Image (spheres, grey):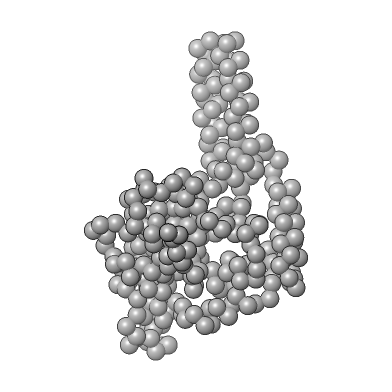
Amino acid sequence: MTANPLTILRTYALKEPSALPSSILFRSTEKFYTIFDAYPKSIFHFLVLPRLTRGMWFKEGEVVNLKALLTTDKEKAKELLEGMKAEAVEVKKEIEQEMREKYGFRWDVWMGFHAVPSMVHLHLHVLSADLVSEKMKNKKHYNSFHPSRGFFLHIDDVLSWFEAEPSYFNRVGYSRHPSWLYSMARLDPKPREALLKHDLECFECYASFRNMPLLKEHLQEEWDKLEKKAPKRPPVSKRKAVEEARETLEVLELGDKGKEASSSKRAKTDEIDETA
């Protein structure tokens, strides 16, 4: 029986890590799974989702989506979102490492939620800031990930809602609302979904386009320009291969002193790679 694509994330969240193939599961922790997005909208695209395990500290219905979570206890919601962000930051580090390995440089990574998600179960998108993908098919796809359109909610912006002054809610009439945080977020579907109908506009240079093929061609050109402007550094794997060959020669020529010198150089190189 084929799984329902709208609830597949919840199905994954209920499973043990061993039950998920490597083609789906990227990494796992006690509380979270990170999976490959089945229809990536950027060169790198992952989803972080809370696991549904026995004895979990939230109910399944509370993590249907962001809107549902924000109607629960404030501190509990904040704790979960901070945990998801921490996991996303680790995923970001791995993406950046792969960027350096494959392309020789790194670029931005976005982390955020869709205001009105199409799939059941809370999930945080972690994707590279390029939106270059054959899976980017239509205006709805593109506008849902546009970083400043308003449908894609950056995790730091969502967390900032928790720090709003109580007077704000009194001023706008939300103090009597049973879910003040939801009101703050304004996650009503109709106005948010209207954002998906906006004209196509490049998130980088704000140029307008009348259709998706033209926009996709432009996004590819923007990515190509970014790649050309990046420092001309060989991929990490190639640099390490060259360094290891040099180290071998030094050891053969200098003996123990060569080993010490090679170890020192390798340590410095690793430090540089971490900051590249």
Residue 158 falls in which quadrant of the image?
bottom left
Where residue 38 sits: x, y (%)? 53, 56
Asked which quadrant contains residue 75, the reply is bottom left
Residue at point 34%, 50% (across, down): 16
Q: Name, please, the residue furthest toward the front.
A: 1
For the C terminus, give its image quadrant.
top right
Q: Is residue 55 left or right of residue 144?
A: left
53 or 109: which is nearer to us? 53
Q: Is residue 249 left or right of residue 53?
A: right
**Does residue 17 lie above or below 133 as drawn?**
above
Q: Is residue 100 above or below residue 51?
A: above
Q: Nearer the viewer, residue 190 or 111?
A: 190
Task: Look at the picture and state if 105 lies above or below 3.
Answer: above
Spot occupied by residue 101 in the image (x, y as percentages of width and height): 59, 39
**Residue 231 visible in the shown view:** yes
Residue 229 horizontal/vertical position (percent): 73, 49
Q: In this rendered view, identify the residue nearer to me: 157 or 209.
A: 209
Question: In the picture, residue 50 is in which quadrant?
Answer: bottom left
